[in-house]
Image (spheres, helix red, strand yellow):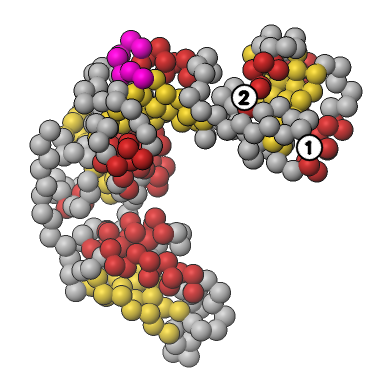
Amino acid sequence: MIFLFILIPLVSGIHVRTYVSSMGCPGCVKWVSMIEQVRFDFPTLTFETVEFDYESASQNTVLPYTTAADSYYPWAQRSEYLVRWLSDISHGRPPVLVQNISSVGDGWRRGFVSWVHVLSSDYPRLDSHARKLLSTGFGWSFMNSSFSNTVIFQRVDGEIGMEHNVNDMNVVLRRLVPSPIPFALTETACVRELLHYFDSDVYLVSPQVPSNLPENVAWIHLFGNESDAKQSNMSVPSAWMWKRDIEYMLPSVSRPELLEWYFGVKESMVEPYYRPSHAIVGDISGNELWSWVRGHPSALLIVYNSLESLYECQEELSSVEFEVGRMDIRVNDHESFPDSNVPGMVHYYSGGNRVSSAMCKDIMKYISIN
């Protein structure tokens, strides 16, 4: 694959001024510190901190605030939004997350590695995506046509695509990365943001990987000679998935085996390569859970991280007539737990499988249903 890099001129000579006060401004120190941490990523901009003059102010002013090129910083004081704003300023873009494009000009996408341009008669629902994908450009243009919409997009590797009558923007956003995804791309901010739009991440370690894999999964490709692969002892060939700290490994990347293994992992039907398991007196460890569950027709498992919360839940379940066990999830985990597993939750098992999960005070409602 050939990557084309286009040199994009940056706007220089812009002063970024942050106004603060040494008195009565508890957020000033934090905001200035945040700017200091990212300023060196923008060498074309000049940064300065200015003590605000209350005596000459003509109106009430909330500090801190930052200006540049006749633009006030408009968003929440978070580092990811600050980086986006500084990027907008340095590339001469308006600080708007979704550009309303009335002409054919391409200045709005200057400096973006990936971008999405929607043409439609009605304004699309792009704002929530734009807030999550701050490294991706979003634009909309009014257009009447026989299509409900037309979406033009640029992938992170520079390839241009187009789709008509898009009903699910998530599908387009997943196509902003190639499949499989070269591992090096996952270390960029843009791709890290886009990975949240996939159902799962699967790492494929092999010189060659299969094609026509499900598009809702981020298939991340390593050759096996990368430092990360060596440090993690990833064998060649192999496929890897993680659920919290639980590791799954398949010593193959053959498409039939890979798909069977992947869907088995999603259904908790595959034994992990590694799960956190620590034996504690009176508790059930991660490695003991399946045998304990399958030894009882019905059972409840309390997961906890403090003895106080454990005792409260045990008291709540004191009238339960079937087996009640416990697990400290600070040092244990299990593949049967839902992604939302948190301390204070109780998992209900029947017939050797997890049937439902809920917080301790609510679990009995789910048992009565089942």
Which quarter of the picture shows residue 256?
Answer: top left
Q: Is residue 25 magenta?
A: no
Magenta stretch in the rendered image: 251-257
The residue drawn where x is 42% and y is 18% is 262
Q: Closest to the observer: 340 or 303?
A: 303
Q: Closest to the observer: 95 or 208?
A: 208
The residue drawn where x is 44% and y is 87% is 53
Residues packed near mark 2 inside 10 Å, few (<14), some (14 to 19) or many (20 plus): some
- Residue 310 got which mark? 1
The residue beneath circle 2 is 287
Specify whether 100 is left or right of 344: left
Q: Is residue 254 visible?
A: yes
Q: Closest to the observer: 178 or 53?
A: 178
- Pick whichever of labels 2 and 1 is earlier in the sequence: 2
Residue pushed farthest bottom?
55
Is disc 2 placed on a helix, strand or loop?
helix
Q: Position of residue 156 (x, y in %)?
A: 22, 40
Can you say which quadrant of the picture contains the C terminus?
A: top right
What is the spatial separation of the Cα atoms under label 2 and label 1, in whole angstroms? 20 Å
Looking at the image, is mark 2 or mark 1 nearer the viewer?
Answer: 2
Q: Tag 1: residue type? A: Leu
Which quarter of the picture shows residue 311?
Answer: top right
Is disc 1 placed on a helix, strand or loop?
helix
Q: Position of residue 175 (x, y in %)?
A: 27, 30
Q: Tag 2: residue type? A: Asn
The residue drawn where x is 80% and y is 43% is 308
Can you say which quadrant of the picture contains the N terminus?
A: top left
